[in-house]
Amino acid sequence: MDFSSKLLENAVYEMSQLPGIGKRTALRLVLHLLKRPNEQTSKLTNALQVLRNDIKFCSNCHNISDTATCEICASPRRDKSLVCVVEDIRDVMAIENTSQYNGLYHVLGGKISPMEGVGPQDLNINSLVKKVKLGEVKELIFALSSTMEGDTTNFYIYKQLEGLQVRTSTIARGIAVGDELEYADEVTLGRSIVNRIPFENSLKAN
Ligand SMILES: [Zn+2]
C-alpha cells in the first residue's frame, strides 16, 4: 500500500496491529476518524489510555475491575461457596448475560497449551487451589471450552484438588465439543450451568 503521507501510514500501521483488522480496514477506520470532529478521536484515545492506566484485576477472582475487588466478588447477594472456573474475562461476561448463575468466578487467564508454551504456572491456578484450601468454597464448576486444552486444564486442576473437601462439576455439554463458551447462545449456556454434572462423570464419558 502506497501512502502519500507518513502520518497516515503510521496511523494505519498501528490500527492494523489489532486482531482482525487488515490494512484496508485500518485505512477505512483512520480515514473515517479524519472526517469526524477532532473530539471523537480524542474521546477514543482517551478512553483507551484511561483504561490502560486505571484498570485493575480483582485480587480474588482475577476478573477485570475498576476496583481492587470486583463488583461480583464484593456483592453480598452472590453465593461465595460456588466458584465457576473460566478461561478469560469474556467467559465471565457470557455467563453473567445468562442471569442463571449466582456464584463467584475464577479467571484462569487461559488454558494449558504445550503447543503455545502455556504451562500451569502461567495461569491463575495456584490462587485457585489456595482459595479452595481456605475451605469456604463448596463447589467448583469447570466451564472451560470443550477442547483438548480445556480438558487438560480441567484435569490438571482436578488433580491439584485431590484430598480437598470440594465438589467439582462441569457444565453440561449442550455446548458442542470444540466450541468456545463465548459463542454459545445465552439460553444454551444458562441451561448448561444449571444442568451441570459431577466432573467424575465427564471423565467416564471420555
Ligand atoms: Zn472478583
Image (tube, grey):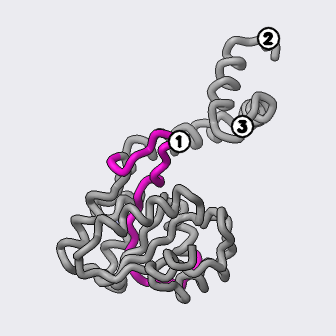
Q: Residue at x 79, y 11 (%)?
A: 4
Q: Residue at x 22, y 65 (%)?
A: 130
Nearer the observer: mark 3 or 1; the answer is 1
Residue 4, which numbered label?
2
**Observer able to see residue 37:** yes
Q: Quadrant of the N terminus?
A: top right
User: Alpha-carbon neighbours of circle 1 within 10 Å: few (<14), some, or many (≥20)?
Assistant: few
Q: Which residues are magenta?
A: 97-121
Task: Please say whether residue 135 is one of the residues in the magenta stretch.
Answer: no
Q: Quadrant of the C terminus?
A: bottom right
| Residue occupied by mark 3 | 21
Q: Secondary structure at mark 1?
A: helix
**Picture quadrant where residue 20 is located:** top right
The verdict on label 2 being within 8 Å of ligand 1 is no
Give the mark nearest the N terminus, 1 or 2.
2
* Left or right: residue 35 compared with residue 197: right
**Picture quadrant where residue 36 is located:** top right
Q: Amino acid at mark 2?
A: Ser
User: Alpha-carbon neighbours of circle 3 within 10 Å: few (<14), some, or many (≥20)?
Assistant: few
* Left or right: residue 92 compared with residue 178: left
Give the mark nearest the N terminus, 3 or 1.
3
Vertical order, 15 against 189 (above or below):
above
> Could you tell me how far apart the alpha carbons at marks 3 and 2 are, in whole angstroms?
21 Å
Q: Residue at x 34, y 78 (%)?
A: 75
Q: Nearer the viewer, residue 130 or 31?
A: 130
Q: Position of residue 167 (x, y in %)?
A: 34, 83
> Could you tell me how far apart the alpha carbons at marks 1 and 2 are, in whole angstroms?
42 Å
Q: Nearer the viewer, residue 88 or 198?
A: 198
| Residue occupied by mark 1 | 115
**Observer able to see residue 70:** no
